[in-house]
């Protein structure tokens, strides 16, 4: 039985210079999925008294970097209400996560369905689908144990999202942008929470560490797939991808990081408090930062054109890519 990871996993990052190096990455990811994987009901001690979910447990209080947790309104609430709001936020993130991964699994299987015999991506896709099934089970089990009426995605958005599994039939590149759009923002928040020591409850910590460890592989595959495929795309399709990417990311990052409407209504959080907390400049910067890795990847692949850049800005998620910022602030350039 594999133990829960004790350190934050890092995704495999290599330069994709040719098909041989691309296949080498897939081989390593396949091996990692065999060597280190976790099962929802075998590797999490759900019945351990330490893992009991109590909605009034002070360990659920929102961490300092959560914008709502910084407000005077939140700090003035009784300790049990602060804990319940914090737990609702955690459970909603897990519910949205399992809903997204449901769409992801269906899309992956649609992609794999058409792969010819002998393609190494087939095996990796089935490894990833298996891991995502266990993520969905552990997320839903956590939600069930909160005994809260957690809904996840807004119904209208959930209905629209049902087209996502069919994206691979039109563009596999766009589908893997969708994959990163769902995985990178939550990975960003989870890593920040763990590194900052903000996760206090052992059940949440165990689930989060397992999720990060396996998502590192999923993110790595999506990134390397795009690095391998995008340079070979027809110029017109590349331009479409460049404009569509910030639309997908702008919507998905906000779904992952915004406060759930049912929680706002349940606790009677004033609209002006929500507005100040989640529409502030700092909150917008956090959303932009959560998609920073994908933004840099798209810039590296040369699909961020003038029109696409304006779309990134319109969604409030544009920032100069790392390489460009590094050049602009290099000592040599500053000395000129």
Image (tube, rainbow, N blue to C red):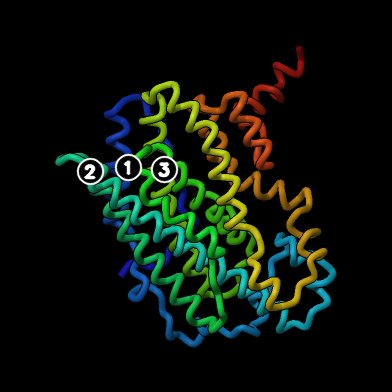
Query: Which image quarter is the C terminus in?
Result: top right
- Per the image, label 3 sits on a secondary structure element best described as helix
Q: CA distance from mark 2 to mark 3?
A: 16 Å
Q: How many marks?
A: 3
Q: Quadrant of residue 1?
A: bottom left
Disc 3 crowd, CA 10 A, few/some/many (<14, 14-19, 20+): many
Residue bearing mark 2 = 114
Q: Earlier in the sequence, mark 2 or mark 1?
A: 2
Q: Which is nearer the eye, 5 or 280?
A: 280
**What mark, if any, has residue 169 been given in the picture?**
1
**What mark, if any, has residue 197 been given in the picture?**
none
Q: Quadrant of residue 83?
A: bottom right
Contact, mark 2 vs mark 1 (Cβ under 8 Å): yes
Residue 155 place in picture, x, y as percent: 53, 65
Disc 2 crowd, CA 10 A, few/some/many (<14, 14-19, 20+): few
Q: Which is nearer the eye, 39 or 48?
A: 39
Q: CA distance from mark 2 to mark 1?
A: 9 Å
Q: Nearer the viewer, mark 2 or mark 3?
A: 2
């Amino acid at each position: 039985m594999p133990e829960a990871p004790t350190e934050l996993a890092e995704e495999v990052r290599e330069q994709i210079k040719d098909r041989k190096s691309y296949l080498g990455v897939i081989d390593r990811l396949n091996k990692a999925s065999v060597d280190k994987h976790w099962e929802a009901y075998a590797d999490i001690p759900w019945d351990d008294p330490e893992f009991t979910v109590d909605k009034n447990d002070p360990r659920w209080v929102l961490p300092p970097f959560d914008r709502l947790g910084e407000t005077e309104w939140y700090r003035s609430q009784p300790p049990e209400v602060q804990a319940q709001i914090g737990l609702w936020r955690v459970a909603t993130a897990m519910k949205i996560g399992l809903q997204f991964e449901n769409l992801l699994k269906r899309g992956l299987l649609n992609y794999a369905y058409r792969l010819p015999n002998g393609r190494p991506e087939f095996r990796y896709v089935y490894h990833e689908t298996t891991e995502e099934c266990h993520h969905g089970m552990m997320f839903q089990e956590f939600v069930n144990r909160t005994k809260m009426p957690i809904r996840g995605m807004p119904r209208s958005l959930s209905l629209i999202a049902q087209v996502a599994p069919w994206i691979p039939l039109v563009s596999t590149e766009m589908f893997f942008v969708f994959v990163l759009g769902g995985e990178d923002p939550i990975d960003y928040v989870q890593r920040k929470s763990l590194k900052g020591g903000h996760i206090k409850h052992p059940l949440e910590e165990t689930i989060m560490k397992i999720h990060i460890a396996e998502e590192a592989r999923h993110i790595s595959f999506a990134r390397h797939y795009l690095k391998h495929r995008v340079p070979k795309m027809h110029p017109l399709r590349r331009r479409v991808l460049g404009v569509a990417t910030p639309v997908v990311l702008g919507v998905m990052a906000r779904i992952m990081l915004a406060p759930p409407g049912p929680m706002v209504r349940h606790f009677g959080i004033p609209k002006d408090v929500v507005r100040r907390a989640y529409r502030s400049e700092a909150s917008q910067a956090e959303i932009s930062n959560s998609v920073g890795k994908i933004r840099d990847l798209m810039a590296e692949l040369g699909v961020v054109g003038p029109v696409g850049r304006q779309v990134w800005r319109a969604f409030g998620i544009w920032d100069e890519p790392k390489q460009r910022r590094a050049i602009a602030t290099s000592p040599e350039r500053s000395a000129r």
